[in-house]
Amino acid sequence: MLAARARHDLRAWQVKRRERTRQLIELGGLIVKAGLVEAADDDRAVIFGLLVEAAAKLRGPDREQHLLLWRRRGKRAFDAADEPAPKPE
């Protein structure tokens, strides 16, 4: 009984770890997809500074305005990325 419970606990820990790993990979992909890596010349301090600045704005009084603006921009960018590239003539 204890062995089965230990396996279950280990399995639950592994599932949580995989979910966190997937989330981190997806978030990193968004940073790349947004063009931040190239725009910042792969300077991680710059990229982190941008993210810290965004987080500060989201804690400020204009939070809802920033969320609305950034959500619209993000949706447009996703939609544009989903459109097929025009065929060369």
Image (cartoon, rainbow, N blue to C red):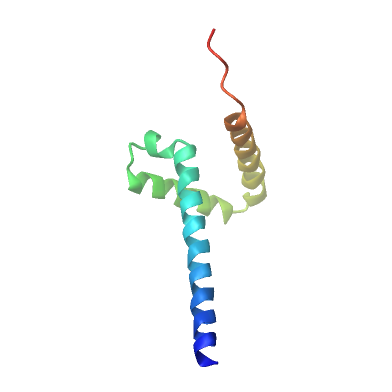
Q: In front: 46, or 13?
A: 13
* Residue 55 spot, x, y in % from top left: 52, 53
**Quarter containing the N terminus:** bottom right
How many numbered marks have been drawn onto this rendered protein structure? 0
Vertical placement of residue 81 versus 22, above or below: above
Image coordinates for residue 86, horizontal then vertical, percent: 57, 17
Is 85 rendered above or below residue 29? above
Q: Which residue is located at x 32 percent, y 43 percent? A: 43
- Among all residues in the image, which is located at the extreme top? 89
Task: Give the left or right position of residue 80, taking residue 54 as reference.
Answer: right
Q: Residue at x 49, y 50 (%)?
A: 27
Left or right relative to 59: residue 65: right
Q: Is residue 13 above or below residue 42?
A: below
On the rendered image, what quadrant is the C terminus found in?
A: top right
Q: Residue at x 52, y 92 (%)?
A: 2
> Whole-percent x and y of residue 24?
47, 55
Q: Residue at x 50, y 44 (%)?
A: 30
Most extreme residue toward the bottom is 1
Spot occupied by residue 51 in the image (x, y as percentages of width and height): 46, 49
